[in-house]
Each structure stands twice: as C-alpha cells, then as structure tokens.
Amino acid sequence: MIDFSADIENCLRVLKEGGLILYPTDTVWGLGCDATNEAAVEKLYALKQRPSSKQFILLLADERDLMKYITQPDPAVFDYLQTVQKPTTVVYDGVIGIAGSAVAEDGSAAFRIVKEVFCKNLIKRFRKPLVSTSANLSGETTPKLYGDISPAIKAGVDYIVQFRRDDLEVREPSAVVRWNGNGQVTVIRE
C-alpha cells in the first residue's frame, strides 16, 4: 500500500482553512476545495477564470453521503451507476447544504462517487464533498498528466498533492448524465 498520509493531512489542513488543492482524482488531475465553503468556491472560480454560470463537479466518497445533499434521493440511481463502465457524474435536482455558487440556478448540482483510493480517503476524512474541476484555465485543454498542468494553475493553489505526480496513465474526464425525477437518464457528456 502506498503511503499518502502526509498528503491527506496537508489537504485536510488547507481545505479546513478554505484553501485550494491540486490533486489526482478518479479521472483527471483536479482543482478542489470545500464544496460547502462559499469563499473557497469563489476563489476556485477566480483561479480558473471560469464564469460562475458554469458549475463544478462535486465528489463524494460513498452512496450514503449523497443522501445528505439532495432533497429527493432516488435509490435507483445506484443501480444505474453499477451498469456504467467509466466514472460517471450525475446531475441531481434539489441540492442542499452546498455553497450557493456551486449549485446551478435551477437548484441542481453534479455529484460523482469516487472509487480512486486517494480521493476516497481524502473525502472520508474531510467528511464533506469536494469541488472538482480540471486543472486548467477555463477554455484551455484539460491536462492529461500532472506535467501538463500550467505553472499558473500550480502557483494559484495552496497545496499540490505529491501522490501520483509521476503517473503516466492517461485518464479521461467522467461521463455526465442528468438523473430525471422519473428515473430516466439524459446523457450530457459521454
């Protein structure tokens, strides 16, 4: 087992202080912060130079965590997620307990339950969802590897995770679907 405990402790300290982290996710390298901290989410929008009308993805460690942040959970979504092959982000209606700027005007937000060991451990220890967005300026190409991340992004965060920096496995962004109230799925990004 790889020891990333120092990275976890440093991330927890920064997240609790409202800071930004650069970290490996179950998909691409991400920029992240406490999804319940309005000031932190605003800092992330500023770093990304991203319009606030474009929401971020929120990461959770377990299915049961989702129940804390949506008003009308549909357990059928978990059956659906068992059928998909790649990491899949789901847009849900009726979001609660999340920073206002991380929630769309219609009250929805996009959540992904992670399986990657570092992210899962970090989120479990933090006990709150993390914002996750690709580690690039808005409109630029998503970096495939840590070495592709721009110096401006690296300089704009409060902590950069050491774990997986030398990983050469190219990972793709998640699929994104909307979970409709009737249990139907609308594919947003494959």
Image: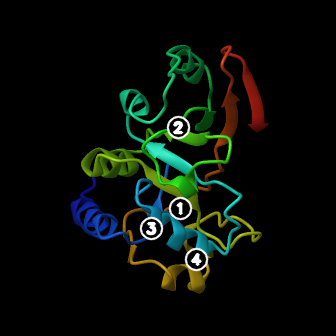
Name which residue lies at 37% across and 27% down.
64
Under circle 2, the secondary element is loop
Disc 1 vs disc 3: which is toward the camera? 3
**Disc number at residue 30?**
1
In this picture, residue 173 sits left or right of residue 139? left
Q: Is residue 4 above or below residue 188?
A: below
Question: Could you tell me residue 75's position as x and y percent?
Answer: 49, 15
Q: Is residue 51 above or below residue 85?
A: below
User: Which residue is denoted by mark 2 in the rendering?
Assistant: 95
Question: Could you tell me residue 177's position as x and y percent?
Answer: 69, 33
The C terminus lies in quadrant: top right
Of pointers 1 and 3, the one earlier in the residue sequence: 1
Under circle 1, the secondary element is strand
Disc 4 vs disc 2: which is toward the camera? 2
Give residue 51's quadrant in the image: bottom right
Under circle 4, the secondary element is helix
Q: Amino acid at mark 3?
A: Ala
User: Which residue is denoted by mark 4 in the rendering?
Assistant: 47
Q: Amino acid at mark 2?
A: Val
